[in-house]
Image: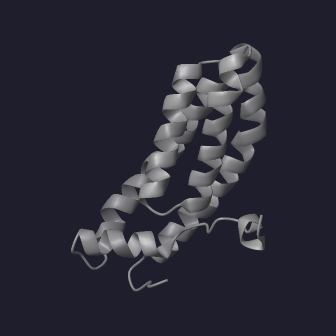
Amino acid sequence: MSAADDAPRPLVDQSVLDRLREELEEEEGYCRVFVGNFIEYLPHRIGRLRLALTTGDLEGSVDAVLSLKTSSQMVGAERLAGLAMDLEGELRNEARHSDVAVVLPQLAAAFLRPINLCSRQTMHRLQSQCSPGARR
C-alpha cells in the first residue's frame, strides 16, 4: 500500500463538476440545478438510510446507500461516496450473513455520524464551488 492509498479522498472532485459543466454546455447553471438538487435531497437520502439501518431493513438499507453513493459520485462528492461504498461493502458482506436486527443498528452507529459530518462539509463545499463567480 502506498502513501497515496492512505490519503483521504477529496471532499469534492472539481474535475467532475467541470466535466458536468462541459457535458451540459453551460457556464454556471448546472450548479444551481443539478448540484442544487443533490444538496436539496441529501438530507432525505441520509434520513432514508438512517431509518432503514435502525429498523433492520436490509433491502431498504442497500437501496438507500446505493442512492447516496451514486448521487454523490455524480457531483464529485468523493469522500461521501467513499463512505457510502464502505457501508455498502459491509451491508453486502457482513449483514447478509448475520442477524440484520443486530448488525444494521451496529452499522448505523458506526457509519451515520461520519456520513452526517461529511454530508454537511460536502454541502458547504459544493455551495461555495458552485456559487456565482466561484471557480475552485
Residue 49, picture quadrant: top right
Going 49% across and 83% down the picture, which residue do you hit?
A: 136
Q: Residue furthest left?
A: 25
Residue 38, picture quadrant: bottom left
Instruction: Return the x and y of residue 133 as percentages of the image width and height.
Output: 40, 86
Instruction: Return the x and y of residue 18 as percentages of the image width and height.
Output: 38, 76
Q: Is residue 63 left or right of residue 36?
A: right
Going 52% across and 70% down the picture, which residue do you hit?
A: 13
Q: In the displayed structure, would residue 133 be above or below residue 5?
A: below
Going 59% across and 21% down the picture, which residue do you hit?
A: 58
Q: Nearer the viewer, residue 105 or 81?
A: 81
Instruction: Return the x and y of residue 97 as percentages of the image width and height.
Output: 70, 18
Q: Residue furthest front?
A: 1
Instruction: Return the x and y of residue 39 as percentages of the image width and height.
Output: 46, 55
Q: Nearer the viewer, residue 93 or 16?
A: 93
Q: Is residue 123 left or right of residue 95?
A: left
Number of marks:
0
Going 28% across and 75% down the picture, which residue do you hit?
A: 22
* Res 53 seen here: yes
Q: Is residue 60 left or right of residue 117?
A: left
* Res 44 seen here: no
Q: In the displayed structure, would residue 122 be above or below residue 115?
A: below
Q: The N terminus lies in which quarter of the figure?
A: bottom right
Identify the coloring.
one colour
